[in-house]
Image (tube, helix red, strand yellow):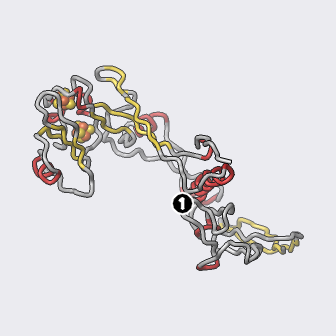
Amino acid sequence: MEFDRFKSEEIDGKLRQEVIGREIIPCDTVVLAIGQDNAFPYIERGIGIEFGKWDMPIVDKTTFMSTRPGVFFGGDAAFGPQNIIWAVEHGHQAAISIHNHCQGLPVTERPPQGMHLTSTKMGLHEWSYSNNYDPVQRQKMVHVDLPARFKSLHTEVELGFTAEQTAAEVQRCLNCDVETHFTDSLCIECDACVDICPVDCLTILPNADEHELRADTLAPALNTEQPLFVSGALKQTKRVMVKDENVCLHCGLCAERCPTYAWDMRKFAVLIPHADSVVPATVAV
Ligand code: SF4
Ligand code: SF4
């Protein structure tokens, strides 16, 4: 394969390049990996791997297996230009399929995704996350002055936050990973959470069909694309706690106010299975 040799120079703040030679590297096969095109001349046709549009292999989007069992593709080679994050995910999914294939299990048999919800409550009004959102302005990061930047193209422009700015900036976090969690058996129907909710998204009312509940909440829950949270029957009156997830701010005030810990703020973590988390199965021989 032939390469041009370049020399790069910075002249008057501009990058100039000049071809200064040529180099040949001997090789048997060259795999094109420029992120713009796919070429599979090295895969023999007629071995069971079917190719479709743009001469791309036909790959199952769940199992990442080609039309030839036991041959898998992912990343750009499977679906054309995407980004590295997708390629890594394809690798994880293909690894599950490869594991199943080697165990003699159907590649379509895939472990489910899981989640963890961990309470952040540490005391009556103490939480393991900072629930005090600070509406201060975004901190302005110090940048290198323009004349200094032009003197060298290698200058790192953003100098980072100071310790004080960092402390102020992290207080602005909305804690999207901390979710409200309700335990109906603990609720004494004191209405404290309903009173304090700044967006009126909580209502305690007799159970009814979804259409009626949506209309009867304190602030009607009109976005039908967002599921409504409806608790089980509460102990005292058999009414239900209804929460309009569409407008909840995750401010945590309901949990802060609740005297019985029926509302809690829980940290959410999604558990994405990988090939090494697949439970070994008994294989029939
Ligand atoms: S987290 Fe805040 S907005 Fe959401 S239900 Fe509780 S009090 Fe209301
Ligand atoms: S504050 Fe707690 S106990 Fe009172 S109504 Fe709300 S969830 Fe129930």
Q: Position of residue 200 (x, y in %)?
A: 16, 42
Taking the view exactly as shown, the residue that stands out farthest to the top is 123
Task: Report whether 82 appears left or right of 252.
Answer: right
Asked which quadrant contains residue 262, the reply is top left
Q: Position of residue 165 (x, y in %)?
A: 44, 38
Amino acid type assigned to the residue bearing label 1 in the image: Thr
Asked which quadrant contains residue 24, the reply is bottom right
User: Can you say which quadrant of the picture contains the N terminus?
Assistant: bottom right
> Which corner quadrant of the figure contains ligand 2?
top left
Q: Nearer the viewer, residue 128 or 80?
A: 80
Residue found 40% across the figure and 35% down from its top: 117
Residue found 43% across the figure and 47% down from its top: 140
Task: Report whether 195 appears left or right of 110.
Answer: left
Q: Let me know if residue 282 appears in the view.
A: yes
Tag 1: Cα neighbours inside 10 Å, few (<14), some, or many (≥20)?
few
Residue found 17% across the figure and 32% down from its top: 234
Q: Nearer the viewer, residue 185 or 7?
A: 185
Residue found 20% across the figure and 28% down from its top: 187
Q: Nearer the viewer, residue 18 or 173?
A: 173
